[in-house]
Amino acid sequence: MRVLVIGGGGREHALVWKINQSPKVNEIFCAPGNTGTAEIAQNVPIPADQIDQLLEFALEKEIGLTVVGPEQPLVMGIVDRFQEKGLRIFGPTARAAELEGSKAFSKDIMKKYGLPTAEYKTFSSHELAQGYFDKETGPIVVKASGLAAGKGVILCRNAKEGLNAVDTIMKDKSFGEAGDQGVIEEFLEGQEVSVLAFSDGSTVLLMDSAQDHKAALDGDQGPNTGGMGAYSPAPVFTDLLRQKARDKIMLPLVRAMKAEGRPYQGILYAGLMLTKHGPKTLEFNARFGDPET
């Protein structure tokens, strides 16, 4: 079987390395790939967001399975396009991938179905956010709702920093269109854990936990990045916490998406905060994590 892996980061190198170990696979392509993937696959000079070109390539090469790394093509609907042409592809549809494409949508789903998460408000203008900060004094989290490559989350110690964060997102457009809508969240204390699971649309199979390190500088200082590194498994994530994450968060979410007419198939990635009240969801992602993979 010929396999196409879409993306060009360390995540895709890890996926190609593992897929290459399967006796069912005789040829692997990676688009666009990197220096590492070039050693074990054929790199294809097509960017991950060029869905028409990727589809044409997959049809021409008779690709038996496509595995999507980054979030952008998933949110753009690459799975829908490939499936329309009868091609096997691993990942959620565009409607399911909205879990990552819109933090506001994701929070609304969690609230509607009673999943444990931080209290929140969504806003679409600086003025709407101002009213919230008039009442808020403690630490708070401000997020760009759309895709921001893991960088659209700003931790704020007080209302002044919160308003500055809103300016960064909505006025300065530091995260582009991702900041057209924002989310203000309660600040949760605890250790953060990434939990990735395979989902067939009805159930979930959890992989090992991981902890990534997002702050740019030593000692958890500096702004959040897409991830400065990760290790797995996370010792703090016990078997009991794993069971709670599965039964109270991951499974209910998959069932909720099915009930909403957005069946979720692919990798479901939950960013969890292990609070004193149990695990709470910070965010859902719709793909393999990078650097966790």
Image (spheres, rainbow, N blue to C red):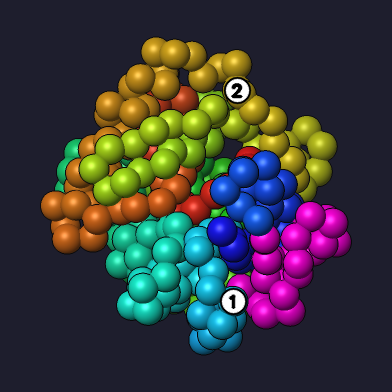
Q: Secondary structure at mark 2?
A: loop
The residue beneath circle 1 is: 61
Residue sitting at the far left = 259
Amino acid at dot 1: Lys
Q: Residue at x 44, y 13 (%)?
A: 239
Q: Where is 280 relative to 224, above or below?
A: above
Name the image quarter holding residue 18: top right
* Residue 102 picture location, percent across and down: 39, 64
Q: Residue at x 34, y 52 (%)?
A: 265
Q: Where is 88 relative to 265, above or below?
A: below
> Badge 2 local density, few (<14 within 10 Å), some, or many (20+)?
some
Q: Quadrant of the C terminus?
A: top right
Amino acid at dot 2: Ala
Q: Nearer the viewer, residue 136 or 31?
A: 31
Q: Is residue 179 visible?
A: no
Instruction: Inspect the magenta stretch and tell me whether residue 88 lies in it.
Output: no
| Magenta range | 27-49
> Badge 1 local density, few (<14 within 10 Å), some, or many (20+)?
few
Q: Is residue 52 visible?
A: yes
Q: Nearer the viewer, residue 237 or 182?
A: 237
Q: Secondary structure at mark 1?
A: loop
Q: Nearer the viewer, residue 113 or 176?
A: 113
Side of 235 relative to 105 (left or right): right
Of callouts 2 and 1, which one flags the residue occurring earlier in the amino acid sequence? 1
Side of 147 relative to 23 (left or right): left
Side of 249 relative to 73 (left or right): left
Q: Give the numbered dot on residue 234.
A: 2
